[in-house]
Image (cartoon, grey):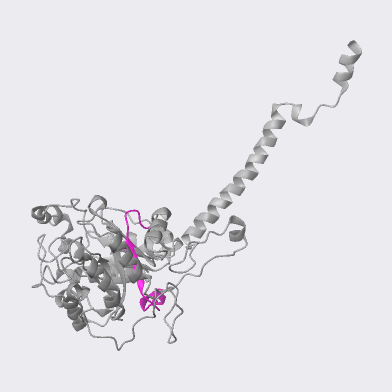
């Protein structure tokens, strides 16, 4: 018995059993290696986010290079220039959704609802009491979409206000008078936002202070103590601050509302000038109208008398009424006959998700079918520079209409 105990004592002791100190040092070394690997993975992911990793062209599903690929410098997309997007090789198809530009599942569902066609633009909103998130640009490109930021110089308004509440809850915001913006009150915030956008490098469509010809936002000249001529001064002031901050990757989009609700307000005095604008946008919805020519025609006529900048419909949809289905059916043929219009953004929201009506193209099976059929006829842009040769179709349908297409306002 004693010999057995003695022999056991003489056995070599395994290193793991030599004490907690050795085990602790080994465990710390292993953790250090794992932590270093994890840290690099996070660094690679963050670096790739800053550079727009995952972007594989507009309308394409995201790609996700792994850590080893990033280590080897593979799959790093080239940052596109702003000019690459200004005059596209096809039509932009965008959507304003509840969780844009971050939610992949939402975008995948939208793609399914649209018959398998992916958006090439994603639209989202930011008030001036909110800080800009550079990741919004990265997320949009990772989803294969050009980011469209509607930047609103106000503190936000009442959700779905009643008609008699609009002027009090939404426009009575004296802290955001045009004169204060012109005078420099918000220069620090504007410059901070501009530098963040500049640092992101990737182009961003900036739809700034939209629908200025209306009377429902505090930056309109007819409300909130503002005066004639101040809107243009305000726009140029903000634009100049962006230029000083080096934010040359911004696609400046001046975007009035269609003139239907405000026929006496002319657009020309509100236009900042071609040197300050890249695109002209429009907000316009089909409401008791059978044709988009009726909806948009008078506004396009005023715009084309001011500038020949490309036009893009920044908000649209069709209200649920007896004309809805006919309007949607007519929208896509009408769009193809107007090469001056380079795209549209559909408002994929209803009253429960922030809109003042149900604009969803899935509001009925008939509208959904009409939307899918019309969308399939469009040649959507790939985000590549326009060429003189006929582009390859990527989403079905015919190529863009030629410059000899029918004049503005023609009936579908």
How many marks the image carries: the answer is 0
Residue sitting at 33 percent across and 71 percent down? 374
Q: Is residue 378 above or below residue 159?
A: below
Confirm whether the magenta stretch covers residue 73: no
Q: Is residue 23 left or right of residue 381?
A: right
Pick whichever, 94 or 212, lies toward us: 94
Q: Is residue 362 left or right of residue 3?
A: left
Q: Is residue 114 left or right of residue 179?
A: right
Residue sitting at 40 percent across and 59 percent down? 112
Confirm whether the magenta stretch covers residue 93: yes
Could one spot residue 80 in this view of the protein? yes
Q: Residue pushed farthest bottom?
A: 404
Q: Position of residue 109 (x, y in %)?
A: 39, 56
Pick whichever, 328 or 316, lies toward us: 328
> Which quarter of the rendering shows the C terminus?
bottom left
Q: Is residue 385 above or below residue 239?
A: below
Using the rendered view, name the quadrant where residue 269 is placed. Answer: bottom left
Q: Residue pushed farthest front?
A: 366
Pick whichever, 275 or 90, lies toward us: 90
Q: Is residue 91 left or right of residue 334?
A: right
Q: Position of residue 13 (x, y in %)?
A: 81, 26
Pick whichever, 102 or 37, lies toward us: 102
Q: Position of residue 360 (x, y in %)?
A: 28, 59
Q: Position of residue 234 (x, y in %)?
A: 20, 68
Using the rendered view, name the quadrant where residue 134 is placed. Answer: bottom left
Q: Is residue 112 above or below residue 243?
A: above
Residue sitting at 31 percent across and 67 percent down? 370
Using the rendered view, name the quadrant where residue 276 is placed. Answer: bottom left
Could one spot residue 134 in this view of the protein? no
> Which quarter of the rendering shows the N terminus?
top right
- Magenta range is 82-101
């Amino acid at each position: 018995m004693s010999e057995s105990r003695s022999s056991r004592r003489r056995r070599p002791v395994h290193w793991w059993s030599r004490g907690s100190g050795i085990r602790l040092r080994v465990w710390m070394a292993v953790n250090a290696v794992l932590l270093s690997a994890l840290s690099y993975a996070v660094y690679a992911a963050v670096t790739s986010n800053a550079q727009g990793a995952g972007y594989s062209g507009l309308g394409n599903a995201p790609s996700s290079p792994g850590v080893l690929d990033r280590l080897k410098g593979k799959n790093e997309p080239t940052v596109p220039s702003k000019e690459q997007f200004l005059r596209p090789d096809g039509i932009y198809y965008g959507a304003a959704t509840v969780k844009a530009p971050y939610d992949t599942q939402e975008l995948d569902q939208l793609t399914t609802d649209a018959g398998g066609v992916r958006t090439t633009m994603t639209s989202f909103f930011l008030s001036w009491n909110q800080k800009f998130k550079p990741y919004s640009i990265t997320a949009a490109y990772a989803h294969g979409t050009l980011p469209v930021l509607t930047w609103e110089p106000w503190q936000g308004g009442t959700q779905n206000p009643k008609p008699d509440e609009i002027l009090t809850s939404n426009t009575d915001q004296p802290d955001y008078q045009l004169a204060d913006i012109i005078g420099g009150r918000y220069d620090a915030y504007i410059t901070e936002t501009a530098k963040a956008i500049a640092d992101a490098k990737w182009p961003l469509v900036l739809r700034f202070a939209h629908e200025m010809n209306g009377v429902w936002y505090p930056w309109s000249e007819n409300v909130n103590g503002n005066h004639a001529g101040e809107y243009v001064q305000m726009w140029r002031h903000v634009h100049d601050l962006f230029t000083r901050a080096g934010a040359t990757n911004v696609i400046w989009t001046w975007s009035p509302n269609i003139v239907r609700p405000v026929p006496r307000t002319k657009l020309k005095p509100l236009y900042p000038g071609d040197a300050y604008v890249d695109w002209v946008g429009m907000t316009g919805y089909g409401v008791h109208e059978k044709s988009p020519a009726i909806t948009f025609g008078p506004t396009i006529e005023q715009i084309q008398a001011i500038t020949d900048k490309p036009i893009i419909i920044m908000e649209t949809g069709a209200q649920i009424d007896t004309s809805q289905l006919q309007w949607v059916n007519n929208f896509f043929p009408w769009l193809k006959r107007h090469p001056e219009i380079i795209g549209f953004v559909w408002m994929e929201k209803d009253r429960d998700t922030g809109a003042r009506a149900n604009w969803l193209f899935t509001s009925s099976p008939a509208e959904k079918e009409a939307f899918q059929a019309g969308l399939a006829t469009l040649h959507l842009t790939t985000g590549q520079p326009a060429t003189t040769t006929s582009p390859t179709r990527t989403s079905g349908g015919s190529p863009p209409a030629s410059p000899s297409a029918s004049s503005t306002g023609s009936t579908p």
